[in-house]
């Protein structure tokens, strides 16, 4: 798929989203780009781009979770290994299988002591999940804290349904998946911003005719030349300090 065709596909799928109240199904994205020789990572890049444009994508969390499961585990750095070792040593010992079953029954009875007890007992499993899902975009210690937040949110919102260990760990994993997806989207947005800055700077250099290197084109004219809207260019100029 060449660049022009890719851009047309992006415009097409954004029009579909607009007609559906700024929402899309993940399957619609795959269908739109079918036959374009895009691999899974490239399709995920499209998904991330669309979400940065304010488009809600149904099924994105599931797709992100599947991708995370397929992702090769990232080795811990020396700093992260040291942090993990020290952190694990501070954790309380978990109860037996029978004691856990009892606490899950009390959890269904809205026993707040059960919430606190189960939270303490499953800190180790939450940390293990954070290690399993370790990513370069976030320090392991921060990821463990996010796992703990997901652990407490799950227990706090368990309701009167009898829950299980399997359910609890799944909720923690879903919470981590969401955090990692947000980190990935932010990185994608940052990378896109850098690309826009570089694109604008290169264009200004190429279009400059005088010795001072100042561009003789207006912002509106640059918008047409670079296929960027005026506000995009103004925001980029502010970042480079050239908006005077």
Image (cartoon, grey):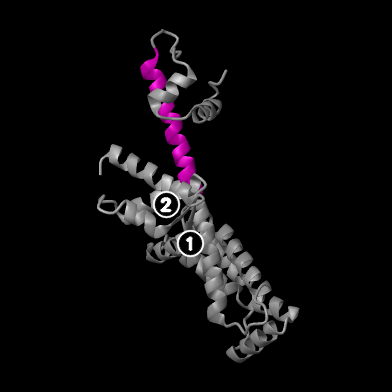
Name which residue lies at 52% across and 73% down: 170
Q: Is residue 37 left or right of residue 242?
A: left
Q: Is residue 225 above or below residue 144?
A: above
Q: Residues within 10 Å of mark 1 (few under 14, many from 20)?
A: some
Name which residue lies at 52% across and 53% down: 182
x, y percent for residue 152: 65, 70
x, y percent for residue 104: 64, 84
Specify the quadrant of the image occupied by residue 69: bottom left
Residue that badge 2 annotates = 47
x, y percent for residue 45: 39, 49
- Residue 190 counted in the magenta span: yes
**Of 11 and 79, the residue lying toward us:** 11
Q: Is residue 27 visible?
A: yes
Q: Principal SS element in the magenta part? A: helix
Q: Residue furthest top?
A: 211
**Of 213 and 66, the residue lying toward us:** 66
- Counting every numbered tag in the picture gives 2
Name which residue lies at 53% across and 55% down: 139
- Residue 103 counted in the magenta span: no
The disc at residue 61 is: 1
Q: Is residue 31 left or right of residue 175?
A: left
Q: Are marks 2 and 1 in contact (CB under 8 Å)?
A: no
Specify the quadrant of the image occupied by residue 158: bottom right
Q: Earlier in the sequence, mark 2 or mark 1?
A: 2
Q: Is residue 156 left or right of residue 208?
A: right
Q: Quadrant of the N terminus?
A: top left
* Highlighted range, magenta: 186-208
Say what secondary structure mark 2 lies in.
Answer: helix
* 3D distance between C-alphas at marks 2 and 1: 11 Å
**Of 22 and 206, the residue lying toward us:** 22
Q: Quadrant of the C terminus?
A: top right
């Amino acid at each position: 798929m060449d660049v022009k065709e890719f851009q047309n596909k992006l415009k097409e799928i954004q029009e579909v989203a607009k007609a559906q109240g700024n929402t899309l199904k993940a399957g619609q994205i795959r269908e739109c780009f079918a036959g374009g020789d895009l691999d899974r990572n490239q399709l995920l890049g499209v998904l991330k781009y669309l979400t940065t444009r304010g488009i809600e994508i149904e099924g994105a969390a599931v797709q992100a979770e599947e991708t995370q499961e397929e992702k090769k585990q990232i080795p811990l750095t020396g700093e992260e290994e040291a942090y993990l070792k020290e952190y694990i040593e501070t954790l309380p010992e978990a109860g037996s299988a029978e004691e856990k079953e009892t606490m899950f029954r009390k959890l269904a009875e809205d026993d707040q002591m059960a919430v606190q007890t189960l939270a303490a007992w499953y800190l180790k499993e939450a940390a293990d999940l954070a290690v399993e899902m370790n990513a370069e975009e976030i320090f392991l210690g921060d990821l463990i804290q996010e796992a703990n937040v997901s652990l407490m949110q799950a227990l706090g919102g368990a309701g009167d349904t009898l829950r299980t260990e399997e359910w609890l760990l799944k909720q923690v994993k879903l919470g981590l998946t969401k955090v990692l997806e947000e980190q990935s989207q932010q990185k994608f947005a940052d990378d896109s911003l850098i690309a826009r800055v570089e694109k604008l700077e290169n264009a200004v250099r190429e279009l400059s005719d005088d010795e001072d290197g100042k561009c003789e084109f207006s912002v509106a004219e640059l918008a047409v030349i670079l296929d960027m809207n005026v506000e995009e260019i103004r925001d980029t100029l502010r970042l480079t300090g050239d908006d005077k």
